[in-house]
Amino acid sequence: MTLATWIAAARLRTLPAAVVPVAVGTAVVAATGRVAWCPALAALAGSIAIQIGTNFANDVFDAEKGADGADRVGPLRAVSAGLISAGAMKRAMIIAFIVAAGFGLYLVSVAGWPIVAIGLASIVAGIAYTGGPWPLGYHGLGDVFVLAFFGFVAVCGTAFVQLGEVPCLAWWAAVPVGALATAILVVNNVRDRAGDARAGKRTLAVRFGRRAALAEYALLLAVAYAIPLGLAMAGRTWAALPLIT
């Protein structure tokens, strides 16, 4: 087990999905109040640690369920490839979540006990996505999970730890962030549809087929761009910046 193997298992390419919601939440704070940089940076570090812990969880639990077979398309999974043992991956997962909890304790001291609920829910969901007796991703709830946690929980939580409240703008800003993160999941699920079906992973792409998944993808993109357009038309012209992409 080399450092390069662990870096690959951490799947650094997924980390923007953890960084963007915190950045957007902080942008909301900048638009409605004064940015509190220490809580913002702690939220960022905690979000990254949870993302890495979730990646480790997905690696080991998908391997145990046979979802990452030899015919898998996409990033290499370390446990299935025999590069890291299941036990070592679970220990790494626990360490990542402990690191996240450490940043969470600081945020509790800043913003109070609601952060305990947010943090625990995020960690439990990160494990329950592919692990536990009823894994969310195996029952077609992965899309809801991503929309909720990468959108509303992350964006609104970031605003809350800095302002002590969640402004209306944060809820609106969370929608396109969550929609784009969910769109990434949809692409992956379409790619993995055949292998997931064989492993009993009943994603929405497996349940309803490729055409329905592509329609979901188009809808998510439409929503992701409609919200900034609406905010711009309501007077927040800076919200139109995503439209240049």
Image: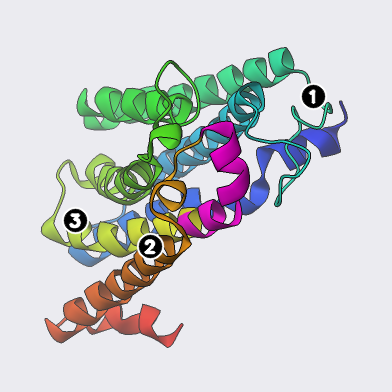
Element type at marker 3?
A: helix
What is the magenta segment's predominant secondary structure?
helix
Q: CA distance from mark 1 to mark 2?
A: 36 Å
Identify residue type, mark 1. Ile
Identify whether 153 is placed above or below 224. Answer: above
| Magenta extent | 186-200
Which of disc 2 and disc 3 is earlier in sequence? 3
Identify residue type, mark 3. Trp
Residue in the picture at 52% in, 19% down: 98
- Is residue 120 shown left or right of residue 214? left
User: Where's residue 217, x and y in %?
Assistant: 40, 66
Q: Which residue is labeled 3 in the image? A: 171
Residue 33 in view (yes/no): no
Q: CA distance from mark 1 to mark 3?
A: 40 Å
Q: Which residue is labeled 2 in the image? A: 212
Residue in the picture at 27% in, 40% down: 161
Residue in the picture at 39% in, 32% down: 136
Residue in the picture at 40% in, 42% down: 142
Identify residue type, mark 2. Ala
